[in-house]
Image (spheres, grey):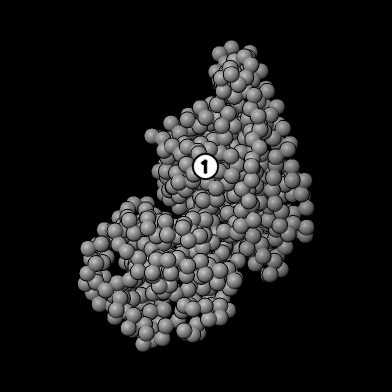
Amino acid sequence: MTRLLMKGNEAIGEAAVRAGCRYFFGYPITPQSELTHYLSRRLPEVGGLYLQAESEVASINMVYGAAGAGARVMTASSGPGISLMQEGLSFMAGAELPCVVVNLMRGGPGLGNIGPSQADYAQATKGGGHGDYHMIVLAPNSVQEIMDHTRRAFDLADQYRNPVMVMADGIMAQMMEPVDLEEDGQIQLPAKPWAATGTAYHEGRNVINSCFVIPEEMEVVNLRLEKKYQQMRQSEQLCDGYLLEDAEIVLVAFGTASRLCRSVVDKARQRGIPAGLIRPITLWPFPYDFIGEIAGTFKCMLAVEMNMGQMQEDVQLAVKGRIPVYHYGRLGGMVPVARDILEEVIKLYGGGAER
Amino acid sequence: MSNEVFFDRKEVSQLTIKNRISVFTGGFGSGKTETALNYALYLHSCGEAVTVVDLDLINPYFRVRVVRENLESKGIKVISPDGKLAGADVPALPAAIYSIFEGKGHAVIDVGGDDIGATALGRFKEQLNVVPRKIFFVVNTCRLHTREQSGIIKMMRGVERTSRLQVNALICNTNLGRRTDANIILQGYKVITGVAEQLGLPVAFIAARRELADQLGCPGAPVLPMDIFMKPPWEDFIGL
């Protein structure tokens, strides 16, 4: 075990290499550029390929090709580039191809700015691309978690033969924290008998395809995919609770916002306010089960997001109208200030937040 | 040298007469910005007129310009992209940088990370070769690419290649953020001393968090006690 000081971007790259990823296709964009910089140096060291594509559309289709051939493969971008990749992501979900896509969100819509944001929540969790599909979305909140969840993302992608997204923002990508690196051992990658590796490697034809021209056949595929998504909903919901036992007002936040909220909860407790925090780690599948079960014991919830309430809707769906779910957000590359969140908590707890 | 006082007032005034400009280079995340800021504040506290130059075109987060107001309120001049360009991701340098080569006082230049970040420094090669200056190379041995001698030398040579300037001294800034202890710093200092001996360069000083600075004993180089400026938003409790 080695303890190092790492940036989020470096941790993503190193975790990918350690997960056996040997192919990266992408295009630099702030605040992701250090990741491409890192992998352009690191992948050749392990016999891998870093390729800077001409665009994000090209990148995701190269990812499609590598995944179809059975490789562990990754791409990364920020909002504008991820938007360009949506068609490819839908194709990969349709063709049941595993890959890891990293979105380091920035202020938007449009070209926006390079400030940290969480405004791509809806795009990531409610489709983004066309057709009935889902992908697992992981939201780490420390450099250690970035390392651990990026690595796990490759396993989940292979397990479900589906794209998996790791989603964070510029602060997570750029900040530095100590990370424990395990010794780099041999990785046993799962067999992929479905991959198009050539008839020397498998019996009969393996076809990678998302085109089903006969509606009856497409519907069968849709139902098969839905079965898989249902299994993800049952097995993969992940969240973290903090001081929930006696909590009356509970904040819900992921990624950067959750780090802020944890200090806000501590400060609120010092003032005698029974506050708690739920931190979704999987944004899809959203931890509906946990929040649904426990929400009845709280008086109200407050979704704190760097967007205008995209996750708040999921919290409301979990709560099913039993208690009010409020929202506090900062937008456009602005980060909430802990003091302002605390004031919101005091306001809600002091009046109007009763059942 | 005693580690209670970094350099005394006399030494500082001699240092700054000998060197009008201190340039801080190093790998990504080696702690150049924190070290440069603390060095500038130290010179300022000794009565020197100090200008800080933000030459970091690489990292749009955690750079000098976010603490500009703080420095200016103390009387330190800051040269960095202004106004609309402060948050932009464009490789633009303010023309005011040229003033440091002509004016009086001491300038501290915070360069971007790695060989890529040092490219912008090469722009000022001509000017830097005709003023008394020191180019420091900041090393944190807890960073992946600069854990060992060979990695440190490779990184330093890269910075020298793209900046077309030669490093004059090393700085030990070994740290694990909040998990740093005295032992980690001393182990790092040992590695960096080895590099310095091999290259025939001095280790100018050791940078250490203020609470650790007096736990290092007499390590063999002066110790600069550091206050940390670049904090994530959840460590900012102003008004709480």
Measuring from the top left, give residue A204's x and y in whole percent: 62, 14
Residue where numbered disc 1 is placed: A46
Say which chain tag 1 marks: A
Q: As rendered, which of A332 and A345 lies closer to the eye?
A: A332
Relative to A67, does residue A300 appear above or below in the rendering? below
* Secondary structure at numbered mark 1: loop
Instruction: Determine if residue B37 is in view.
Output: no
Which class describes the residues within 10 Å of circle 1: few (<14), some (14-19), or many (20+)?
few
Q: Which residue is at the front of the view, B158 or A68?
A: B158
> Seen from this angle, which residue lies furthest bottom?
B10
Callout count: 1
Q: Residue at x 60, y 21 (%)?
A: A201
Camera-side residue: A34 or A190? Answer: A190
Q: Which residue is painted at 70% across and 60% down in the image? A: A275
Q: Position of residue A41 (x, y in %)?
A: 45, 46
From the image, which quarter does the N terminus of chain A lie in?
bottom right
Residue B211 location in percent, x, y?
56, 77
Residue B141 in the image, given as x and y percentages of width and height = 51, 63
Rendered position, B1 above or below A63: below
The amino acid beneath tag 1 is Val
Front residue of A254/B166: it is: B166
**Does B191 sit left or right of A251 as displayed?**
left
Question: For the point 22% across and 69% down, which residue is it?
Answer: B130
On screen, B145 above or below B174?
Answer: above
Picture quadrant where residue A92 is located = top right
